[in-house]
Amino acid sequence: MTTPAPLDEAQIARLVDRFYDKVRADLVLGAVFNPVVEDWDAHKRLLTAFWCSVVLRSGTYQGNPMGKHRGHSIHGGHFERWLALWRETTHELLDAESAATMYAYAQRIGRGLQLGLGLADAGAARALGIRIIGQGATG
Ligand code: HEM
């Protein structure tokens, strides 16, 4: 059995490219992204730099993700959909181990963003059997 190749910039760029093509076409996520993102190639380059900084410690992304997510009427349902599409895409393009790694990073970062934005973590709440009132509301 051959050992799968470790994640590299080319794989991450391909993942980001396919993922944001899906986001653009997605009813739920596209409604948030499409009015904001004017240049999708630039957005993909930025997000490739972000993920290379997270996974490969490339240091090529220097931004403020938390600040960028404020003021877009993002709610917990958006995070669920985002993570579901991310999971699907990682499995389409990566070996099982790399897909799991990329999903775990996204889950952790997504949880941090949700907490920072003052959103309840819908997944964790459901696991605890808690219903979040107003989870579907925007604002
Ligand atoms: C784990 C989940 C997520 C990660 C890791 C993530 C990461 C990022 C990063 C790094 C940026 C670029 C920030 C910058 O310009 O420096 C960004 C932008 C953006 N994200 Fe997310 N994001 C996540 C979830 C979401 C969700 C659920 C939404 C809502 C639908 C969302 C909507 C946006 C939008 C609209 C932008 C563009 C903001 C702008 O240019 O003003 N993100 N994201």
Image: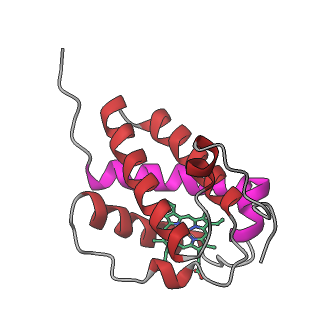
Whether 98 is drawn above or below 20: the answer is: above
How are the residues colored?
secondary structure
Q: Nearer the viewer, residue 86 or 66?
A: 66
Whether 79 is drawn above or below 103: the answer is: below
Say whether residue 10 is magenta: yes
Q: Nearer the viewer, residue 59 or 101?
A: 101
Q: Which residue range is magenta in the image?
A: 8-33
Task: Specify the quadrant of the image occupied by residue 95.
Answer: top left
**What residue appears at the point 60 percent right and 46 percent down from the top-left corner?**
85
Quarter in which the C terminus is drawn: bottom right
Q: Is residue 77 rendered to the left or right of residue 85?
A: right
Task: Specify the quadrant of the image occupied by residue 31.
Answer: bottom right
Q: Is residue 116 rendered to the left or right of residue 72?
A: left
Measuring from the top left, give residue 60's x and y in whole percent. 28, 75
Magenta segment's dominant SS is helix
Q: Nearer the viewer, residue 72 or 7?
A: 72
**What residue appears at the point 54 percent right and 49 percent down from the top-left corner?**
18
